[in-house]
Image (spheres, rainbow, N blue to C red):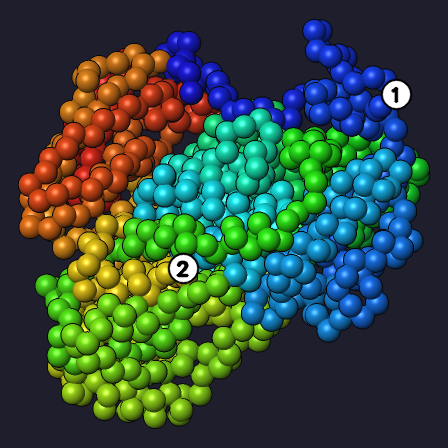
Amino acid sequence: MAGTNTAGSAPTLMPTRRDLFGLLGSVSITGLIPGVAYAATASPTYRDPRAPVDLRVRDLMARMTLEEKVGQTISLWATKADVMMPGGLDFDPARATAAYPAGFGQVTRPSDKRGGPSVAVTAGGTGAAWRGTASTIAFVNAVQRWARGTRLGIPVIFHEESLHGYMAPDATMFPQAIGMAGSFDRDLMRRGQAIIGREVRAHGSHLSLSPVVDIARDPRWGRIEETFGEDPYLCGEMGVAAVEGLQGDSTTLAPGKVFATLKHMTGHGQPQAGNNIGPAPIGERELRESFFPPFRSVVTRTGIGAVMPSYNEIDGVPSHANHWLLGKVLRGEWGFSGAIVSDYGAIEELDTIHDVARDLNGAAKLALAAGVDSALPDGLAYRTLPAQVRAGTVPIAQVDAACARMLALKFHAGLFEESSVDPRAAARLTGNAEARGVALEAARKSMCLLTNDGTLPLAPKGKIAVIGPNAAIARLGGYSAPPRQAVSLLDGVRALVGGAATIVHAQGVFITQSEDRSQDAVLLADPAKNRALIAEAVEVARGAGTIILAIGDTEQTSREGFSANHLGDRTTLDLIGEQNALFDALHALGKPIVIAAINGRPPSWPGVIAKANAVLECWYPGQEGGTAMAEALFGRINPGAKLPVTVVREVGQVPFYYNRKPSTQRGYLFAETAPLFPFGHGLSYTRFEVSAPRLSAAKIGIAGSVGVEVDVANIGQRAGDEVVQLYVRDQVSSVARPVMELKGFERVTLAPGERRTLRFTLGPDAFALWDVDMREVVEPGLFTIMAGPSSAQLKSAILEIA
């Protein structure tokens, strides 16, 4: 961001994003570019790959009927049934022509069998009935052949879910997003997302519905695992890296790249009562200070292809009907010119949930006026648009704008020039050795050591008991699919130890009765059966020298609650079912117990954590997680991740986040005020020393920047990683400001005795606030610059801005 003009004035936003979509807010033809040779007029301009995209869009739209324009705004998911062979999964060109004579613009998740025989229209999961690579690509190629043969030959764009891996069989599954955030490693995020994008593109899709940069402030919310945590700066940095990995840096998609979709804008991560899609009780200043920044960062620093609004309402206005949010802020202030695509069914929910529309007609009218360009997953509401335009209740200009942006996305994706997809190449590129190696690196770097009394690292000797409901299963988390291979903790321990120790195993308890996350009802396991399993586990552990206990969540107990009959949010945060009882029974044996926490929600387990000898937070560590967990427990690697969230002691502390206002967290009767673990916390098998920050100047102007140097030294006996974190506090301001805000971080690997100096630059954006008149300004005064290994262990220096 550029500096300010005068003291207390608003910083001038200087976007650095690569504008992929031109000035498509208008549909007027801008004309030819002088000096560029175009194809002969006998061939339509829109078919000329050398012509500017802006011109190609306008040329094509001038030839389109109203129905064809609306067709570009809808997608098919359950309605894939309309275009498939009766009773089968193959694409049927004749049925497609009959059902969609004006064509359709998009297909939702070609990798699943939705719309096929005996496939329920429910959430994805183990019951989603995926296609394989060959079937997916055959379907994609058949749809595109049909589309090329339609009147104008407009190709279809396919989209897939790819939160932490392409959600299709055999694809590479990385650690869940919250674990990747804990790595504090931008480059790792970029490389992992590049692999995800490559696998998605190899199967014929050009649009991925990720990353998620929601600010997560309520651990009751079942989708917290999908986020990068609670901090705006961290979420923005990881979001930028994810988009760079998926899309690359070209103005058009290079081979192996896909457009990213930034979601969910916004307030989604602090819903009322922790209920998914609940109202976000957030004012404009809080939006601009905390919830907008990661979205703004991605939009202004990358060429992000699409943005998805959130399900929730803000101050009574649902995001999918919020023109201020999508038009004034996203497009007007930040300069976004890409496509805005709806969350699944969210336009229809303007009628069915929010009651701001009387019917689908009204819902479509509201969403289109707000700037939503594409209706996912089935476009039910937008199918009413041709009649509404003819009736004069919806302006054709709004349809034109939406169509233009969807067409621009396709031109920039190269879809008009692309040939068919090769299933053999897809098979080679999916889940291969390179991808598996990066997934393992990601799992290793997401391991976060929360507590350790010296029990870790373990020695591979004697008898070691590996017990618990998450020991023998590779838990991947939401939005995942069965990878080509997956390693459980038990697998990893056995492979690492080999014959050096005896490994014994017991289930301990089951958490739920089913492992199918697509199942609507969630039933806890039978307590009586679990009591018998606990007794069995105690006997197995009795002869062991050490116990590794794998506990936490399942894909059912922490998940997206997308409807009243498919819940995922909770009123309690402690271990669910009989897991506490299992721990107590094992603890009574008097043997060292090491916890491997495998979970989506932060581990607010005060009883277990107080008694355990060590706790390793693993999150959902991806397909290679078992190997990484074993390596961390036995010291083959040194855990170096940090917490991207504050971990509360109990649910009554919620919401609790480190970048709080000064008047909060005064305390409670009969309870501790401090969290169980602070944001940025994470231990190591070695020791680090982080210096106080040194400033390049003690005083700077309002438009100035300051350099900050921080020394970090490994003063222990092992090589290891430290994440140096840089925070800022405005000491006195015209509006209340957080007690600290993260403004920089760097993860470094140091050998024993090694010292390194890290250098940061803090510009006006690090000091800006939104004043009483809602202007973004830098105010003169004193600022505390802090550095350390966590938000609770900081050294400081003072900077004056005048």
Residue for badge 1: 42
* The C terminus: image quadrant: top left
Where residue 483 appears, as percent x and y from the top left, is 49, 62
Residue for badge 2: 622
Q: Residue at x 70, y 63 (%)?
A: 114
Residue farthest to the top, as pictured: 35
Where residue 143 appears, as percent x and y from the top left, is 77, 50
Q: Residue at x 70, y 11 (%)?
A: 36
Q: Residue at x 80, y 61 (%)?
A: 84
Q: Is residue 662 visible?
A: yes
Q: Amino acid at mark 2?
A: Gly
Give the mark nearest the N terminus, 1 or 2: 1
Q: Quadrant of residue 759?
A: top left
Residue 301 horizontal side relative to residue 423, left or right: left
Location of residue 585 with respect to 695 vertically, above or below: below
Which numbered marker is on residue 528? Answer: none
Q: CA distance from mark 1 to mark 2?
A: 53 Å
Residue farthest to the front, as pictured: 424
Residue closer to the observer: 562 or 723: 723
Element marked by disc 2: loop
Location of residue 649 with respect to 312 vertically, above or below: below
**Contact (CB < 8 A) between labels 1 and 2?**
no
Where residue 18 appears, as percent x and y from the top left, is 54, 24
Residue 187 horizontal side relative to residue 336, left or right: left
Q: Quadrant of residue 19?
A: top right
